[in-house]
Image (cartoon, rainbow, N blue to C red):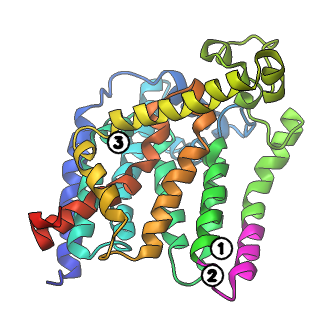
């Protein structure tokens, strides 16, 4: 049965309002920010005063987006600025529910796409994270847009997808990894299209146009357009050293191998990273993905109700993203670094729901 556009919009609004209530329940608006979210807030205040200098470990995209809204308030209280950032973060996280529905429509009909949107809207980790004022909500929304346009049958939309990938790099330094993942998906799923390279070349031109101001400024400030503070410390192999202010702790991968041997390198930065990723994934999959996801993964190998190219794209996105994070997770197994995968995991988790409803328990 086809649902009317009005019914779908009303349902999504209702789900968004319930999700908004869950987000607001976890927030204490009487406490100002600290740590990373404080850094974003202070940088946004600096932007309002004309200072757009970059930091060695964070992108400027989120703080630049925040800064125009600070012109709307005049206050000496940090709490007021913190609450503006909270409101923006929550608003963007809530708006993402509609985008998740659009991505879900690539895999399911209207009814099950609403299930995808609902599972995303009620995901407790995302609702709790939304009020922290961090860059994750806008980062997740732009990733969804990038993936959505990559799935288009028309290769010209890779231009839009790569443009959004450029925005991702502004938001977070490791946003470059999404550019790599999207490129892999594009060439695998669109390899038979005659305009494959032409449109990708145009997309690369737009991507470079978007990121070039950031790269030039990083070169002026740090002497390296690709400078990232963690890169020169991650191969020290110790989290406490990584976050210390000791400037004498820099070490490359080659230095680590020379000092500790190749077997130690593989154990520390490959096996430990893979173990940490799966451990964190198992934890954040609670409460409901832990049950649904294994069946969804199994059913995805024979996904006769879904476009096989789209299922392949989902697999590539998840596996390539995790593969590019192995080294990071070997030292910094931070849960929120994997939150961007939730929509893609939820797509797999919805397949068993669809199978049971459409074909009964015999589907197992």
Residue 159: which disc?
Answer: 1
Residue 327: which disc?
Answer: none
Q: Mark 2: which secondary structure?
A: loop
Residue 301, horizontal then vertical, whole percent: 37, 65
> In the displayed structure, does residue 57 sit left or right of residue 291?
right
Mark 3 = which residue? 126
> In the displayed structure, does residue 1 sit left or right of residue 272?
left
Q: Residue at x 33, y 52 (%)?
A: 94
> In the displayed structure, does residue 322 sit left or right of residue 88?
right
Seen from the viewer's position, the closer of residues 283 and 3 is 283
Q: Total of numbered circles in the picture?
A: 3
Q: Is residue 196 magenta?
A: yes
**Label 3 vs label 2: CA separation?**
32 Å
Q: Residue at x 49, y 45 (%)?
A: 72
**Label 1 vs label 2: CA separation?**
6 Å
Q: Quadrant of residue 228?
A: top right
Find the residue positioned furthest to the bottom.
194
Q: Mark 3: which secondary structure?
A: helix
Quarter of the image containing the C terminus?
Answer: bottom left
**Label 3 vs label 1: CA separation?**
29 Å
Mark 2 = which residue? 156
Q: From which residue to which does the magenta span run? A: 190-206
């Amino acid at each position: 049965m086809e649902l009317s556009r009005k019914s779908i919009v009303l349902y999504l609004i209702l789900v968004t309002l319930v999700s908004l209530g869950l987000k607001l329940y976890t927030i204490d608006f009487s406490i100002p920010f600290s740590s990373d979210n404080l850094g974003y807030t202070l940088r946004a205040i600096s932007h309002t005063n004309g200072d757009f200098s970059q930091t060695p470990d964070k992108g400027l995209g989120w703080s630049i987006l925040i800064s125009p809204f600070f012109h709307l308030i005049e206050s000496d209280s940090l709490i007021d600025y913190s609450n503006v950032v909270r409101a923006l973060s929550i608003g963007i996280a809530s708006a993402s529910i509609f985008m998740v529905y659009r991505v879900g429509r690539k895999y399911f009909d209207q009814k099950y796409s609403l299930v995808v949107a609902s599972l995303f809207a009620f995901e407790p980790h995302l609702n709790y994270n939304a009020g922290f004022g961090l860059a994750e909500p806008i980062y997740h929304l732009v990733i969804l847009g990038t993936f959505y346009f990559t799935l288009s049958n028309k290769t010209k939309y890779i231009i839009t997808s790569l443009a959004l990938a450029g925005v991702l790099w502004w938001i977070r330094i490791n946003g470059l990894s999404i550019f790599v993942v999207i490129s892999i998906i594009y060439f695998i799923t669109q390899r038979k299209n005659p305009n494959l390279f032409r449109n990708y070349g145009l997309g690369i031109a737009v991507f470079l146009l978007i990121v070039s101001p950031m790269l030039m400024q990083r070169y002026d400030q740090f002497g390296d357009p690709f400078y990232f503070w963690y890169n020169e410390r991650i191969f020290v192999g110790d989290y406490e050293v990584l976050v210390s202010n000791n400037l004498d702790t820099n070490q490359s991968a080659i230095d680590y191998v020379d000092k500790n041997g190749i077997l130690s390198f593989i154990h520390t930065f490959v096996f430990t990273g893979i173990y940490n990723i799966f451990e964190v994934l198992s934890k954040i999959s609670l409460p409901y993905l832990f049950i649904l996801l294994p069946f969804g993964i199994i059913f995805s190998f024979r996904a006769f109700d879904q476009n096989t190219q789209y299922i392949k794209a989902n697999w590539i996105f998840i596996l390539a993203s995790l593969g590019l994070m192995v080294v990071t997770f070997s030292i910094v197994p931070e849960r929120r670094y994997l939150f961007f995968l939730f929509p893609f995991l939820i797509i797999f988790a919805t397949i068993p729901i669809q199978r049971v409803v459409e074909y009964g328990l015999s589907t197992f």
